[in-house]
Image (cartoon, rainbow, N blue to C red):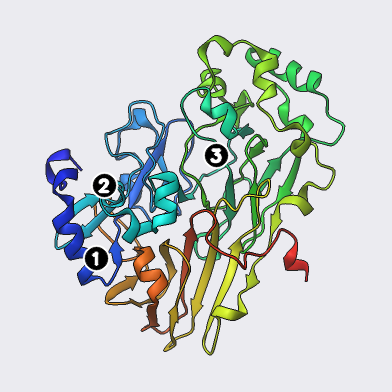
């Protein structure tokens, strides 16, 4: 992808109007691949194995695919479009970011556009061979110190992208109740002595396909090796608190990259960015664990719509997500109160007049037919989806903040 073969932002209006009219409010998106220099690709994103290092070995392997993103990836040495989703129409591509800026009310709804002036969330498939460092994402006040936004996030483990467990299907989350700040400080003081022992202060949870978690900002977590669907806030801030993972050294710069430069050696300040009460919560699982809940109001004969990400963070509905399953031959119309970004995880069919087809193997730079942005205009008007294959058609879609008035609460799956 070069800047030369993308429709420029000041020329987007014409092609966007044609794309929206032709797609009846649906926009075809192309794959957005993101490498991470400090991680090891899990090889389940259906990206061709020869293309895992398409950005160059020095940039690291590709272990993320982002969906409906207007958020740039905070990678050193990034290419100009890294993290951004592209829309495809009649062989031409343009940024979803530019489309939102051009026609925000049509695409994400006027209330969301007026408040945020952008699509403020995104999602990804995160696919790693093993665990990653115990880390946190800054809260909004802390991120603001470096001109960024905070990052709450969530997890769902889609069975269709988890044919194997890989090396460590467990995630350390939070800190053991009773842990002291002095103990965490000692781990930071021991950063350059080898394994700093931060995992000795945490508990690991076995990951289960078809379930998920809600992770508030400021909460430590070391994601395990299941491929994870991650609806989250549109930010890429983080701080790594673990010095060695699987024998690989984690540079101190990855702990402090989103903190004010004058605070890079201030251990009290660094620890102060943790939400301490949430980390040492005695009922951590009850406070954060998710299991699917059927939305009876949007399910019917041959199709089932399930909540997979739900609940609020400090009373705010930051994002949510659903999984729609249609049996062979089934057809339904989904009508949502807000825009969403869709990724097909199984089967084939159609959404409106766009084909849905789950890929088997994708070459870097190729387009696919598995990803769609459902604009506010289309979502509120109703979108017809049909399974034209012989197996279930399954798709995941995530929503922006404050979209639903019937969002389940954490723990409602028990009912």
Q: Position of residue 74 (x, y in %)?
A: 41, 32
Residue drawn 51% across the image and 87% down it: 302
Q: Residue furthest right?
A: 178
Check disc 3 and report the residue beneath it.
151
Residue drawn 53% across the image and 51% down it: 230
Q: Which mark is residue 20?
A: 1
Dot 2, how many residues are within 10 Å of its Cα: few (below 14), some (14-19), or many (20+)?
many
Cα–Cα span, label 2 and label 1: 14 Å
Judging depth in this view, the residue of 281 and 105 nearest the camera is: 105
Q: Which mark is residue 98?
A: 2
402 lies above or below 126: below
Relative horizontal placement of residue 226, taking residue 375 as reference (left or right) = right
Q: Position of residue 379 (x, y in %)?
A: 40, 70
At mark 1, the secondary structure is helix
Residue drawn 70% across the image and 12% down it: 189
Dot 3, how many residues are within 10 Å of its Cα: few (below 14), some (14-19), or many (20+)?
many
- Dot 2 and dot 1 residues touching (CB under 8 Å): no
Judging depth in this view, the residue of 295 and 175 nearest the camera is: 295
Judging depth in this view, the residue of 275 and 200 nearest the camera is: 275
Dot 1, how many residues are within 10 Å of its Cα: few (below 14), some (14-19), or many (20+)?
some
């Amino acid at each position: 992808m070069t800047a030369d073969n993308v429709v420029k932002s000041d020329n987007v209006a014409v092609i966007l109007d044609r794309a929206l009219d032709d797609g009846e409010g649906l926009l075809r998106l192309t794959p957005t691949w993101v490498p991470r220099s400090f991680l090891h690709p899990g090889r389940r994103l259906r990206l061709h194995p020869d293309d895992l290092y398409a950005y160059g070995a020095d940039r690291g392997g590709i272990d993320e695919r982002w969906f409906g993103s207007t958020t740039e990836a905070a990678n050193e040495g990034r290419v100009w479009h890294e993290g951004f989703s592209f829309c495809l129409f009649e062989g031409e591509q343009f940024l979803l970011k530019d489309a939102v800026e051009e026609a925000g009310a049509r695409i994400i709804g006027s209330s969301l556009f007026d408040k945020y002036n952008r699509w403020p969330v995104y999602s990804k498939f995160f696919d790693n061979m093993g665990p990653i460092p115990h880390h946190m994402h800054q809260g909004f006040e802390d991120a603001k110190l470096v001109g960024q936004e905070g990052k709450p996030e969530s997890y769902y483990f889609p069975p269709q992208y988890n044919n194997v467990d890989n090396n460590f299907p467990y995630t350390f989350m939070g800190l053991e109740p009773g842990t002291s700040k002095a103990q965490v400080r000692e781990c930071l003081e021991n950063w350059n002595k080898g394994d700093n022992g931060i995992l000795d202060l945490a508990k690991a949870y076995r990951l289960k396909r078809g379930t998920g978690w809600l992770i508030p900002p400021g909460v430590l977590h070391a994601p395990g090796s299941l491929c994870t669907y991650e609806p989250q806030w549109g930010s890429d801030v983080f701080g790594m608190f673990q010095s060695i993972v699987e024998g690989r050294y984690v540079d101190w710069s990855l702990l402090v990259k989103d903190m004010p430069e004058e605070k890079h050696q201030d251990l009290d300040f660094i620890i102060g960015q943790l939400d301490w009460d949430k980390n040492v919560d005695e009922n951590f699982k009850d406070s954060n664990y998710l299991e699917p809940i059927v939305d009876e109001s949007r399910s019917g004969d041959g199709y089932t719509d399930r909540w997979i990400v739900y609940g609020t963070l400090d009373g705010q509905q930051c994002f949510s997500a659903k999984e729609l399953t249609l049996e062979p031959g089934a057809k339904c119309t989904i009508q949502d109160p807000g825009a969403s970004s869709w990724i097909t995880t199984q089967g084939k069919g159609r959404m409106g007049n766009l084909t849905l087809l789950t890929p088997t193997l994708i070459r870097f730079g190729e387009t696919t037919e598995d990803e769609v942005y459902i604009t506010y205009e289309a979502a509120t008007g109703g979108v017809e989806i049909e399974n034209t294959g012989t197996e279930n058609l399954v798709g995941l879609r995530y929503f922006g903040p404050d979209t639903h008035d019937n969002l389940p609460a954490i723990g409602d799956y028990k009912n």
